[in-house]
Image (cartoon, rainbow, N blue to C red):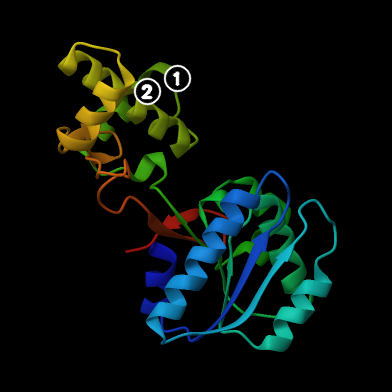
Amino acid sequence: MVAVKTIQKLGYKRIAILYDKAAYATTYAKGLADEAKDLLKEKRANNIVFYDALTAGERDYTAILTKMKAANPDIVFFTGYYPEAGKLLRQRKEMNWNVPFIGGDATNNPDLVKVAGKDAAEGFSFLSPPIPRDLPSKVAKSFLAKFSNKYNRTPTSIWAVLAGDGFRVITEAIKTVKSTDPDKLADYLHDDLKDFPGLTGDISFDEKGDRVGEVYRVYKVDGNGNFILQP
């Protein structure tokens, strides 16, 4: 998991994990939080000093921020969505608490900066597939050039590009097996599709249907509110 690797690479030892317990976010946010907690416990090099949830949609998170601050973490990993992340960052700054925050891919939205304000958002890190302008492959660069020529802009979201990759992989499977039978397509994708040249990189799948290789990267918000890919 990229979040755990990043936390360990940066040398943080005392970890706070905060997730979103709203009905629409429970599976994603709680699942990501639980996975991070379990992996960190396995490593035994980190101390989880705080693990709790907030309720999405509330206006004031100073109570839970104060509770986290008392636990004295080196970093906060927030697994919820960008509206709550923005509020947390803004209210953290108002409290003059400078602990770094890192988020999951649900915080990858330009409105995060609008909610938090540029000053409060600066330094926030999140994990996400590369945003379109940072896609490295030749296939992606060709696609982005054609997209820009037609629409006078690049795609604003990586999720549309990932959906496009999903569509291209399915059409490749249908063309190869000459069938739309779901079981035949699944067998081909699991066992035979190797290094398909996707917009988001080469695509292969393991026996569970998970994509092989690490797609996620680390981004950090700069002083102008831009999302900057980290080396």
Residue 172 x, y percent position in the rendering: 22, 20
- The answer to which quarter of the image holds residue 119 is bottom right
Decide if residue 26 is in sight here: yes
Residue sitting at 45 percent across and 19 percent down? 151
Left or right, 163 with respect to 103, comes to: left
Decide if residue 154 is in sight here: no
Task: In the rendered view, tell whether residue 15 sits above or below residue 27.
Answer: below
> Depth check: 177 or 45 in front?
177
The reply to whether discs 2 and 1 touch (Cβ–Cβ < 8 Å) is yes
**For the residue carrying disc 2, how many other residues have a C-alpha within 10 Å: few (<14), some (14-19), or many (20+)?**
some
Dot 1 lies on which element? Answer: helix
Q: How far apart are marks 2 and 1 (CA)?
A: 6 Å
Dot 2 lies on which element? Answer: helix
Q: How many labels does the image show?
A: 2
Q: In which quarter of the image is the C terminus?
A: bottom left
Q: For the residue marked with disc 1, what is the amino acid? A: Tyr
Which labelled disc corresponds to residue 59? none
Q: Name the residue under label 1.
A: 151
Residue 28 x, y percent position in the rendering: 57, 50
Residue 177 x, y percent position in the rendering: 17, 17
Residue sitting at 25 percent across and 48 percent down? 212
Residue sitting at 41 percent across and 87 percent down? 45
Q: Quadrant of the N terminus?
A: bottom left
Left or right, 140 with respect to 61, comes to: left
Q: Mark 2 points at which residue?
A: 147
Q: For the residue marked with disc 2, what is the amino acid? A: Phe
Residue 141 x, y percent position in the rendering: 26, 34
> Depth check: 14 or 118 in front?
14
